[in-house]
Amino acid sequence: MSIAEVVIAPVSGKRDFDAFVDLAYRLNAGDPNWVPPLRAEVVELLTPGKNPFHEHAKMQLFLARRNGRIVGRISAHYDELALAQPPEQGMGPGTGNWGLFEAEDETAAHALIARAEQWLRDQGMTRVLAPISLSIWEEPGLLVKGHDHSPMVMMGHNKPEYQQWIESAGYTVAKRLLTYDLAVDKAFPPLIDRIVASGEKNGRIKVRPVDKSHFDRDAAIIIDILNDAWSKNWGFVPFTESEKRYGAKKLAPLILEGANMIAELDGEPVAFMLALPDVNALLKPMKGRLFPLNWIKLLWWLRNPQPADFRVPLMGVVKRLQASRMASQLAFMMIEYIRRYSVGSHGAKRAEVGWILEDNQGMLAIADAIEGRNNREYRIYGRPL
């Protein structure tokens, strides 16, 4: 079957937009490990005026049809803030992206990718990093390891065939993102206990939970640390003020005080760690719909998730402390406090830490020290245009 038999067209109008959103539910319906996202969340992600990513980005959605039947979708987009980053950090001038990729077969996949690439060329882009859906902070990368179990909250999941289809379109790996699985219902190794105990004796250190009664203040502290801590990381794009407010609002329902920590040194916030209850376990049977009754189940669960495993999506230590023993000590203290809380208050048995960049030796060493097991790998691919 030739590419000519697949017709790629820009999404135009509500009917096309709805078809773009709905396609993922049809193509992944047979995968027992796929977790259908809430449809309203997907619509919000793609809608300018609702998602502040669109304030500094340009996006075009495409649908693939064969004999009038929809057989695939893709987004092509670029982020003005990413274009302004240093090229040695992964993004930089001329770097566009595609994402939200779904296809029935390799022919449709190649036609979609080629069309996204052409759109990016037309916008002046000279290279592509993909899949990224849509921001680097949302769902970066293609799952290539870990298809045999469901993703945790805010993690992507895709068909295993996509790896070969993307690589056969001329893409090579730009960066690997790793996730580590932890058994948290048992204590960490004795060395970790000693490091934590030592930190607790240090009067300069204070590790406290996020205070939801002052959530806006603590959310701002966390994002400021994140923007500093990650500013030299591969793929980093800073948060805008509107994205800070938006992110805080979106995360607020999942924030449990004892599972999210801010570390202070001499009274100054210098590190944080977030852990979110795995709402995906609840969302999975909802098939993307909150109505008519699923919203009641969700609200009830969010009041006190029981039982709940946890994901650590983000942590950071200010640049001036990175590579120091203090940075590792703060990390071990926060993760141990979160472990105790998640087990004692929510019956957690396991947690996932990630994504971790493949060359982030500090975080990889921490994952190894707490006996984490690499259970997922995502890949961001690249190629010149």
Image: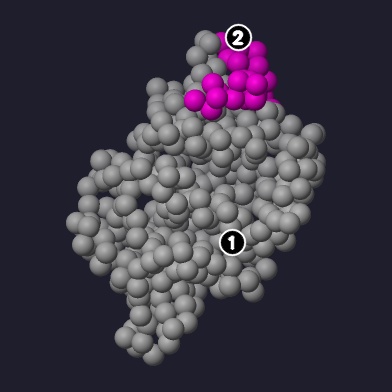
Q: Is residue 271 above or below residue 57?
A: above
Q: Is residue 204 above or below residue 178?
A: above
Q: Main secondary structure of the magenta part?
A: helix
Residue beneath label 1, please?
146
> Which residues lie in the magenta part?
193-220
| Residue beneath the point at 64% across and 59% down | 288
Q: Residue 258 falls in which quadrant of the image?
A: top right
On the rendered structure, is 250 left or right of 121?
A: right
The answer to if 160 sits in the magenta stretch is no
Residue beneath label 2, please?
203
Front residue of 118/193: it is 118
The answer to if 208 sits in the magenta stretch is yes
| Residue beneath the point at 22% across and 52% down | 94
Q: Is residue 70 visible?
A: yes
Q: Residue 211 falls in which quadrant of the image?
A: top right
Q: Is residue 325 visible?
A: no
Q: Which amino acid does the dot numbered 1 rest on? A: Gly
Secondary structure beneath dot 1 equals: loop
Disc number for residue 242: none
